[in-house]
Amino acid sequence: MKKIILITFICGLFFSSCSDAMKRLYMTTGLGCGTGLAFGAVYDEMQRAKDNKERKKLENQVFNVFKKRKAQNKGKTIGLATGCLAGLGVGLYLNMMKEDIQENFGKNGIELEEVKDRSTGETVALRVKMDGDISFENGKSDLKGTGKDNVAKLAEALAAYPETNVGVTGHANRTGPESGNLRISKDRADQVVSKMTSNGIERKRITSVKGLGSSTPLEGVRPEDGKNRRVEVKILPADV
């Protein structure tokens, strides 16, 4: 606890010495944990807490700070600064991201689905769901219409969360030789990556780009169905 007080005091001194412009910059990043040190100390306390109720209480206190900042910046994506992932831990970071993006981009059809670790129940990734999906015409890999717009909106949302990486997988419906399905599904994934980078997402953040052919149809959908011509995106925490 002394560690928390000391680091928080140092961060407070640093913040108070900033210019008004710098203060506004930190405030717009939500929690403003530029180095992650203060919240890192809090997370250390969470990890040491044997009582699950006590740990949950600490998490809720941090989450309430985020919610208060959201209320003061209604209609804006709050985001989290560099260092917050190490400070808050994967689960809390992703849960905050999920709430913020869905509040600000839900009206545009973006929904995030939590991917949980089966043993711990912690959120380890976010699966992106969108109205109209990122879909393609038969035999084509070029992005058009709703699919193109969805990728641009997703790139805008991800810009506020620099400590996330992205996994992209392309898919095809089952028509013709599987070699062709594999090729076009990879082309579709590449097209989405190209669109994301042209909308400001650094290429190094896209850590996985795969074409899975027709091997993974949507649940409850026949492999031949055109709904399987799609690209799926998963949001992953960067290495900490």
Image (spheres, rainbow, N blue to C red):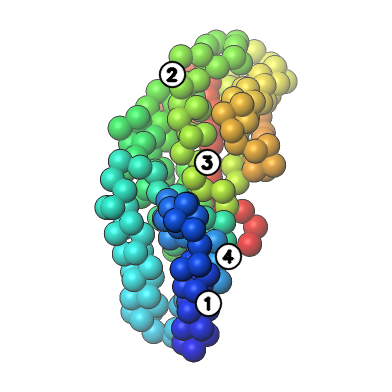
**Measured from the top left, where is residue 8 in percent x and y?**
48, 77
Structural crowding at the residue carrying mark 2, measured as other residues with C-alpha within 10 Å and reported as few (<14), some (14–19) or many (≥20): some
Q: Residue 159 in the image: x percent, y percent?
A: 52, 41
The residue pinned by badge 1 equals 10
In the rendered image, which residue does mark 3 sit on? 159
If you read the primary sequence from the N terminus, does the residue marked by circle 3 or circle 1 appear first?
A: 1
Q: CA distance from mark 3 to mark 2?
A: 20 Å
Q: Which mark is residue 163?
A: none
Q: In the image, which is nearer the foreground, mark 3 or mark 2?
A: 3
Position of 23 relative to 61 (above/below) = above
| Residue pictured at 50% horizontal, 62% vertical | 18
Q: Is residue 56 visible?
A: no
Q: Work out how far the residue at label 3 is from the one at label 1, CA to CA, in angstroms.
A: 28 Å
**Amino acid type shown at disc 2:** Thr
From where the camera sits, is residue 106 visible?
Answer: yes
Whether 127 is drawn above or below 48: the answer is: above
How far is mark 4 from mark 2, CA to CA? Answer: 38 Å
